[in-house]
Image (spheres, rainbow, N blue to C red):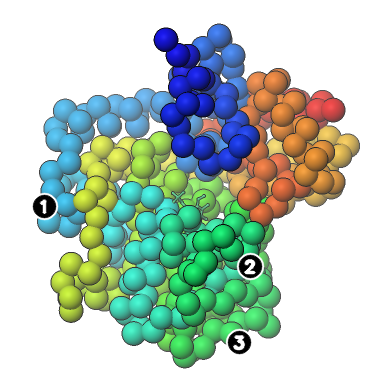
């Protein structure tokens, strides 16, 4: 009889030689619990997923109700399913009215892939621009957009016609031209270590994309669903994009993603050829139920309105002498230390003390703080007190 740890080592395909490998048997609110009663305060929400914390009663109730009605019925886009259309309506109501068509998929990378195909069909072009240190997913198209050579060089050849510009650098916008199908950009760069850009940059970017006729596609997979203090971070940036990518926090802990665009753009995936983009499970009813409950709770509990105050409170309470800088856009935060070796030591020590945090793929000297938006002030105190005492 193997233990779960032994089975993990024996049968689970690894993503690295050194996984976190803490064992969790159940979770509730901001806490995750191990088999021997260990308790971890989850400061990263499964990398920006559990916006309402773990096992939010409204989410579990909505899932239960849905699984008693029906599970999968038919491939995406064929059958009218009440929960899916209610979610589409609720999603459209969260953003700019022009973005009124939702294509449901299962993950962030799939949202990226679908949007790449959409941009090719809509513009008749195949070149893309993305940013240095961008992360849009790990599948081949999304990997081609990734702005980090270390993670992608072993997988070349990738898609041709992709160029990377510096995030937030207006002078690089001239690289966007009449051959560009789309610019992919995170509204707040996540894996680069929480980087934001001023309104003037977003305005210039919007203008340039309109001028050359390319689609402006914002990746809100990490930054959406209230994490930055507005429902979508693009609303805080003061622009209206052509296409929005979402996943992670959207599903309330269930696997779900979407790309959203004006109907006039989205239409082109359904003709010449028909069935231009397909998914069996995209918009799974149980995941849609969880997402609809997430939107309703975010709205009814006015959680998004409290995001910036909680972020400020974190900043006030974080007093560790090794902190060099704190970058924050709402509850999407990066706490920078001197170097990776110092940070890694702190992250390991924090886990020992019951606090789960992380670093960023392309910014390994910064600690990731992206807790459930439901985190209370006393839970923030608890987290900061552990961090402040790390040695
Ligand atoms: C900004 C961004 N885009 C896309 C993705 C890919 O999402 P997924 O892991 O669901 O494929 C991620 C995942 O971390 C992300 O942070």
**Residue position for label 1:** 79
Asked if residue 125 lies left or right of residue 380, the reply is: left
Position of the N terminus, as image quadrant, is top left
Mark closer to the chain start, 3 or 1: 1
Above or below, 149 relative to 252: below
Label 3 to label 1: alpha-carbon separation:
44 Å
User: Pointer 2: residues within 10 angstroms few (<14), some, or many (20+)?
Assistant: many
* Residue contact at pointers 2 and 1, CB within 8 angstroms: no
Quadrant position of the C terminus in the picture? top right
Q: Label 2, label 1: how many angstroms apart (C-alpha)? A: 40 Å
User: What's the residue at 14%, 32% (across, down)?
Assistant: 69
> To which residue does mark 3 refer?
174
Of the pair 268 and 204, the residue shown nearer to us: 268
- What numbered label is drawn on residue 132? 2
| Location of residue 211 in the rendering, given as x and y in whole percent from the top left corner | 48, 89
Q: Nearer the viewer, residue 60 or 32?
A: 32
Q: Which is more toward the observer, 381 or 267?
A: 267
- Which secondary structure, mark 3? helix
Give the image quarter of residue 297: top left
| Nearest-to-viewer mark from 3 and 2 | 2
Q: Position of residue 358 (x, y in %)?
A: 65, 38
Residue 281 lies, with reference to residue 171, above or below; the image says: above
Residue depicted at x 60% and y 25%: 41
């Amino acid at each position: 009889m193997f233990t779960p740890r032994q089975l993990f080592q024996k049968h689970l395909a690894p993503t690295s030689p050194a996984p976190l490998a803490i064992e969790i048997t159940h979770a509730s609110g901001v806490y995750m619990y191990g088999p021997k009663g260990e308790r971890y305060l989850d400061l990263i929400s499964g990398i920006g997923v559990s916006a309402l914390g773990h096992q939010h009663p409204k989410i579990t109730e909505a899932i239960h109700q849905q699984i008693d009605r029906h599970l999968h019925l038919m491939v995406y886009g064929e059958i009218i399913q009440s929960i899916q259309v209610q979610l589409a309506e609720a999603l459209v109501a969260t953003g700019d009215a022009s973005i009124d068509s939702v294509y449901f998929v299962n993950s962030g990378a799939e949202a990226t892939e679908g949007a790449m195909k959409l941009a090719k069909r809509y513009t008749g072009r195949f070149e893309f621009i993305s940013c240095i240190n961008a992360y849009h997913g790990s599948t081949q198209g999304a990997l081609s957009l990734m702005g980090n050579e270390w993670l992608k060089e072993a997988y070349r050849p990738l898609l041709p016609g992709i160029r990377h510009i510096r995030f937030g650098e207006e002078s690089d916008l001239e690289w966007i031209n009449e051959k560009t199908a789309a610019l992919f950009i995170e509204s707040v760069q996540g894996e680069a270590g929480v980087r934001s850009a001023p309104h003037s940059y977003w305005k210039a970017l919007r203008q340039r994309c309109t001028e050359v006729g390319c689609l402006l596609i914002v990746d809100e997979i990490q930054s959406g669903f209230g994490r930055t203090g507005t429902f979508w971070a693009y609303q805080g940036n003061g622009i209206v994009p052509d296409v929005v990518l979402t996943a992670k926090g959207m599903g309330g802990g269930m696997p779900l993603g979407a790309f959203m665009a004006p109907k006039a753009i989205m239409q082109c995936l359904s003709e010449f050829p028909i069935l231009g983009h397909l998914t069996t499970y995209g918009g799974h009813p149980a995941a849609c139920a969880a997402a609809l409950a997430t939107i309703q709770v975010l709205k009814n509990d006015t959680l998004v309105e409290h995001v910036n105050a909680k972020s400020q409170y974190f900043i006030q309470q974080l007093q560790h002498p090794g902190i060099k800088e704190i970058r924050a856009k709402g509850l999407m935060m990066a706490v920078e230390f001197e170097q990776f070796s110092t940070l890694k030591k702190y992250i390991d020590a924090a886990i020992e003390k019951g606090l789960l945090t992380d670093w960023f793929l392309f910014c390994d000297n910064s600690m990731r703080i992206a807790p459930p938006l439901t985190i209370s002030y006393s839970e923030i105190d608890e987290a900061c007190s552990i961090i402040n005492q790390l040695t």
